[in-house]
Image (cartoon, rainbow, N blue to C red):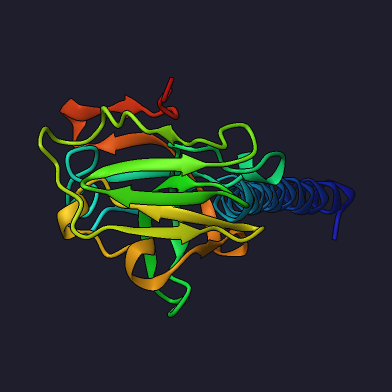
Amino acid sequence: MSVYEILNNFAYYYTIAVVMKQFFSSVLEIIEVTAVAFAAVFLIRSYIVQPFLVSGSSMVPTFSDGDYLLIDELTYRFRAPERGEVVVFRYPKNESVYFIKRVIGLPGEKVQINKSQITVFNEENRNGIVLDEKYLSENSAIPGDGEFKVPEDSYFVLGDNRAYSYDSRNWGVLPKSDIVGLVQFRLWPPGDLKVFAAPSYK
């Protein structure tokens, strides 16, 4: 084999090697980007935010069946839930089921329901404070009266559609450990996009 043929073969195989190296580099780059993207999605879904589809009418008129929400899982790692916030949680009697309700009573408080009026008693309001719930439908009735004591690390939660909500009046208080996160944003339906914040009761 002549020197020319040797050099020609060397150039040919060198070119193939360069092309293969570029190809595998591109494949590795795609794999790396894909892995990072999946890891980011996993971390976001696991620790920061996740979607939630409303099923049923217990939160009407605030949320309707089929509403698609974003749940903030990060906020409650830094502070406790506040009155009026809407939360998604695991149903205490069956943790494979998820509910959505509004926080009404905080740890250590007493919640009194009397003729569709809610009064909350705590250290700052020993005579009670009546909640002005503007988010409810007009003439929204609360079936039944009663008093409920909220233990530490627990919350009293109600659906906004009081006549058709299965909530703390039925199954008791919600342990803090069962809360998944805070409802922050409605994504669907498109014409009803909205950011949510806790109402003021004063």
Asked whether, in this view, residue 79 is left or right of residue 92, the answer is right
Q: Residue at x 66, y 48 (%)?
A: 36
Asked whether, in this view, residue 111 is left or right of residue 75, the answer is left
Give the x, y percent position of residue 127: 51, 35
Q: Residue at x 16, y 26 (%)?
A: 191
Q: For residue 93, which quarter of the picture?
A: bottom left
Pick the residue in front: 29 or 50.
Answer: 50
Pick the residue in front: 34 or 119.
Answer: 119
Pick the residue in front: 88 or 40.
Answer: 88
Asked whether, in this view, residue 55 is left or right of residue 35, the answer is left
Q: Residue at x 22, y 54 (%)?
A: 58
Give the x, y percent position of residue 81: 57, 43
Residue found at the far left of this picture: 139
Asked whether, in this view, residue 83 is left or right of residue 132, the answer is right
Q: Residue at x 69, y 50 (%)?
A: 32
Question: From the image, which quarter does the C terminus lie in?
Answer: top left
Does any portion of residue 57 appear in the rendered image?
no
Residue found at the far right of this picture: 3
Q: For residue 33, which quarter of the picture?
A: top right
Give the x, y percent position of residue 168: 39, 62
Pick the residue in front: 55 or 7.
Answer: 55
Residue found at the far front of this picture: 127
57 up-or-down from 121: above or below: below
